[in-house]
Every structure is written in C-alpha cells, then in structure tokens.
Image (cartoon, rainbow, N blue to C red):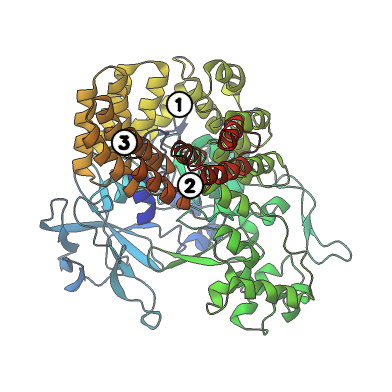
Amino acid sequence: MRAVGIRVLAACLGAAMIVLLARCGDHAPGESGKIVTASTGHKSARYVGAARCASCHPTEHALWQGSHHDLAMQEVNEQTVLGNFNGASFTHYETTARFSRNGEQFVVETQNADGELTEFTVVHVFGIDPLQQYLVETEGGRLQVLPFCWDARPSSEGGQRWYHLYSSEPIPPGDLLHWTGREQNWNSMCAECHSTGLVRNYQVEENRFDTHYFEMDVSCEACHGPGADHVTWAENPSKQVQSTGPHGLSVDLTDRSGGFWTLEEGAVTRTRTAAPSPDNMLQGCALCHSRRRPLVDGTEPGEHLLETHQLEWIRDPLYFSDGQIRDEVYVHGSFLQSKMHAAGVRCNDCHDPHSLKLRAPGNALCAQCHDPGTFDTPKHHFHPTGSAGASCIACHMPERTYMGIDKRHDHSFRVPRPDLGPLTGAPDTCTSCHEDRSQKWATEQISLHRDGDTSWQKPHFGPTFAAAWSGVPQASEALAGLAMDPNWPGLVRGSALQALASAPLRTRLPVAAQALSDSDPLVRLGALSCFEGTERNVVDQVVGTLQQDSSRAVRIEAARLLAEADAHAELIESFNAAAERPETWLNRGLYELARGDLIAAEISYQRALTFEPRFVGAAVNLADLYRTQGKDPDGRRVLEELIVAEPQAAAGHHALGLLLVRTGESAQALVHLEKAARFAPGDPRFAFVHAVALNDSGQVGVAASVLEAALIRHPGDYDLRFFYTSLLLEQGERTGARLQAEILLRLFPQDRRAEALLRATQD
C-alpha cells in the first residue's frame, strides 16, 4: 500500500465506520507434498501439490513453470536471490542498509523497530520482475517485508540496483510504514495472494500468527481448488467423490455457456453469442487481482469474490473520480467498469492462464476482436503507424507506476476523455504523453480528427463523483440517477450509492430501498450503506430482508446494520478473519455499541488502541463512549494520550475541544478546535464548530473570518453558509446577508430554513 493510503487511514474520523482493505495475507509452511488441512470457515480443503498435478498435466505444468505465479515466493538460495549481497550497501536518509553473505545465508543489516542496527537473515524472496523483495522473520510468527528492493530490470533500463520502496520519505522506526510494522507484515498483507492453501490464523490473545500454507507460490490448486478428490477420480473414475465439481475438482473453470466470439457481417468488432457461465475464471482471478478486504480466513477457490472478500468502491483516494486507477487497486475494479467486461471478455481471452503471457504481441492482441483495418490505422489513433502513440494500450490502457518502478495498466479500456479533465481533475492519456499541451488542446485535436464529430463525448459518471467528493450539494440527485441507471456497471452504481450515504435521508432512502432488490450484489451492498444512522424500525423492516441474501458480503453488512445478537455468525467470522487489524476492532466496537453492549464496545476500542495508539477513530469513539457514561475524565485522558502520539490528529483535537466546552474550559477548548480546523481544512464540520465556539465566546469578527475562509474551500456547505449568513444578519449587514441567503437558496432550493433566512434579510 502506498503512503497516501495509510496516512489517510491514520487521520480517519471516528464518527464513521472505518474499513481498511487487507490486500494480501502468513508463517509456518506446510511441508511440500504433504496434505495440510486448512479451515475455510465452513469446510475443509485437501491439497496434493503441483508435482502431483504435473504427472498428468505436463503441458500445463510446463507453461506454469517460471511464470510470475510460480515465482511469486521462493526459498532462499543462489538461484532465487537476484539482489547484490556481496557487501553492497544502500543509504536511505539516515539509514544505511548492508547486504552480505554468511555462508549459505543472505543477511541484511538495518534498523530494527527500536532504531538499532541489527542483522536479519532473509528467509524468502518475494517476486521476480520488475523487482524483488525480501522477507525476514520477527517475533510472533511474523514475516516482514524489508523496504529495500532489488531493481531486477536490466542496467540499460536503470535496474540492477538497490532502492527503497518509499524513496521520497524517511520512514523512521515507529512510522506507520516502517518495515517492522503492521503495514509491511506478510502474514496479513501479502501471503494470501503469494501462496496456495493459506490460513493466516492470527491468535488474538497471544498477538501472534500461526500461519500455514500448502505451497509457497500460486500453484495449480490456487485456481483449480484442492486436488485430492480429483486424484481419487483420476485413479478410479467410477469411485464416488465428495467434490461437487466435474471430475472431482472443486472449481469448474470450463465455460459451459456454449458462447463463442463471432464477427457479424458488416461489423468491425467481434461479439459473444452468450455470456461466460459459470463465471469462475473471472472470480478466481479477482480473488487476488483486486483491492479488497477479507471476510473469511482461509479462502477456497471457486467462490464468488463477494463470498470471501469485500471489494473496494470507486472512491478517493483509491480511484480518480472518472474511475481511473490511482492508488494500488490492481485490476478487477477497473475491469468491472469496462465495456469489455460487459461484452463477455474474460482474463483468459488476453492472457494465457498458465504462463500468464499475452495471447499475441502488441496491437495483434486487440486485433483478435477489433478489425485492424478499422482500428489499427492513423485515421483511428491519429498517430503514425508503428509509433508509440499508435499502440492500442497507450490510449486505452494508461499506466501508473507503483512500488517505485512497477508499471501497471488500467483495465477499464476507456476512451480517452481529455474533455472531462476540467470537471474531474483526473489525468488523461493524451496530455499524459503530450505533457506540453493542455486538455483543451487535446479535446480540440480529437474533434478535429473526427471532422468536428463530438459524439465521443458521451455522458460519464466522473463529473458526478467529482462533485460528490468535493461536497457539491446538487451531486446527490445525480448520484441517485447513477445508482438507478442499469446501463452503468454494478461497481459504478454501488459506488454511487456508497457516496450517496452522506446525503439527506429524503434523498438517499427511497433510492437505496429500491436498489436493495437489484440483481447485482454490488448494487445491493452499496445500497446498505445508505441506511447507516437511520431509525431502527426502518432498518429492521427494509434491511432485514437481506439476512438471507445470496451474497455473503451483503449478508454481513445487513447483519452489521441490524446488530442483533443472533444470526450474526458470518459477521463475527469476518471480524475474526482480520483480527490483527486495529480497524477491525473499531468496527467490532461500533457493532457492539449498536447492540447495546457497552462493555464489549469499550474492550474492542481499547484493543484497537493497543494495536495502534495513534488510531484516531478508535480514540474518538472510546472517548465518546465514556461521554455517554458520564466519564469525561476518562475520555479526556484517552484524547490527550492520542494527541501526544499523533499531535496533528484533527478529529482528536476536535473531540477534546468539545469535551472542554462541556467542562466549561472555553479558552482551552478554542485552542483545540482551532487546531482541528487547521489540521483538517478539508473537513467543513471542524471549521463550523470552531466558528460557533468563537461566536459563543464573543469573538464574532474572528468567527466570521473563519467562516469566510472555510467557504472558499467549501462553497456548497449548508451549515457554513447558513451560519455565516446569520452572523451577517445579526451584525446588521443586510446586503451581505441577503447575498449569502440567495446563494444558499440556489444551492438548496425549496429549503424552508433558507427561505426563512432570506425573508429575514428582506424585512
């Protein structure tokens, strides 16, 4: 995970449920060739190993050998270690790492968690191209990923060197991103997608992992499922096996729809006669090639992604508002947005599933379905044949660089839209290449090459998301429209509902109630977020219908909202699946609070803070729990300890300021409320409360100045503008107040309070 994602999490407010995706997730390995039983929460899995598969499937095994799946993780030896361990050194800010050999061992000397130089022995190598990382063992069954990576590219491309994963930040010991910490823990963050038959098996009370896997790479059974029953069938086809799949396999990857790709007469693009069914190929790939968080510990292949994980939404800062990849979100989320996905294209149409290599080189890959005489010409791509700009992926799969040197392509296969840039703030592939040109120029060039035709500028969800993310009030209606339009992909519609959750009840509830019956589980899941904070009778009546939903992710979210003591086994299992994460304990505390179990909620919040003393959300929620119990002194202690650990915790300062207001310490309260507004200028609520406190203390002019500055950043915020208008009116500045009231009414038409305020300025 990149630094921005972690730092955003650390600053999250406690008033809302905080969920972090565990992207990858282990220690004690199963012996190669030995069957290891791995609990998946509802059944057992038996593995036989790649060597056993190879005895009957030599062609597939040969293709798989040497692939990125095969080499996802390896034992340490002369052949597998690519980095220079012959006395090399690398300095990153104040830290110098040294790489050496001790007999057969590969050793790295660097700072430990306390900042002391310590030698660590590399126990596994991680990946192979374009970089290789190294794992060392620490306490509690943990494997940690060192921050020093080997650039495996050729020297001619700038490779064959050591570099630091976060080259522009010092990352000292104690930092959230320091290599000894939770965010660089292999068991939780990586192992699930770099090994086969994994169970993280975190032991809460001992704060340790007893992680197991069957094979330390992405082997045959990671995709095809455990093979013991298949071997039994192969040895005796007439023998009864337990597996429900064909030939004793637990995963049916065969497309049984009968569909095929065909080129209709006069068409320039192939179409599929029937959608793939079952769609297990896509779901199998999505398990790892997506940004998601686990719902179970020990995933068995063959299930829909939402049975084992919850996919991340299109939201800031993970995606740009037009859906382009931004943070490290991998492939699945962007692919679900594409017309390719809707048309029935699947991963194996472009990638060989065993070697992972592309089916064809360059533009020939796209020419499998798209007529090259129509599309692979300057008339279509506007660039000289054979040039970089003539490449299909240059325009339709823009790339971003992660982990310093790893370039990855967006898989939404979007049409370049520089015209959207001014509305969304998102980059576009044209000016990303033509850096000296503007998006206006790029828009004009496309229209010019299309002889003035502007039909390519079709409606897009990007401006709606951009407006919603920036707090524009009118965005709510547009979000509702997106959510109910079946022509948009399910992930877009679900993300629109998730963004709509902060809209007024009258706007979101009718839309969400209708969306709960949608056929797409992502839409139903997004709709549930709109019921956060609604009256209990509404939740019981409407959300209760989803307790038996066909999707585990939907059932779990419905269970969280219902917060009843019974029938919540899957929700508890989802908490246990990520019990090593502090945000899990915050979420569990919120659930316990909703159930009315204040003791359990307190224990969960405290456990979250034990994991991470700087966890703002947990501290703020714990302090608020103490407030409801009349224990403000305890809450004050929690918030003051948070601020010592995280001095710029805006939500912590805000909560402490409100506490001090309650205890009558107004002067000190203003200090903390001012810091909250200063440290989080993007949150209009902090500025509003600061201004209210200033006004209450008699500093009306200062309050007005705070509101003026905040309105520049948040011109569409109702509370800021209403309060500013009221202050102007109270100060006798009727002209200014009338102007502000008119703006307020334009932003919120038919709002009765705004109408009354405008009338007051006219009296």
Say which residue appears at 47% left-offset and 53% top-offset. 712
Is 462 situated above or below 585? Answer: below
Near-viewer residue (754 or 346): 754
Mark 1 surroundings: few (<14), some (14-19) or many (≥20) residues within 10 A: many
Mark 2 surroundings: few (<14), some (14-19) or many (≥20) residues within 10 A: many
Q: Position of residue 47 (x, y in %)?
A: 44, 41
Label 1 sits on residue = 571
Say which residue appears at 73% left-offset and 73% top-offset. 447
Near-viewer residue (671 or 736): 736
Mark 3–mark 1 Cα distance, whole angstroms, equals 49 Å
Say which residue appears at 75% left-offset and 79% top-offset. 379
Mark 3–mark 2 Cα distance, whole angstroms, equals 66 Å
Say which residue appears at 24% left-offset and 20% top-offset. 631
Is 99 situated above or below 624? Answer: below
Q: Kindly indicate the quadrant of the structure image that contains residue 628.
A: top left
Is 602 situated above or below 361? Answer: above
Mark 1–mark 2 Cα distance, whole angstroms, equals 25 Å
Say the numbered circle drawn on residue 222: 2
Label 3 sits on residue = 698
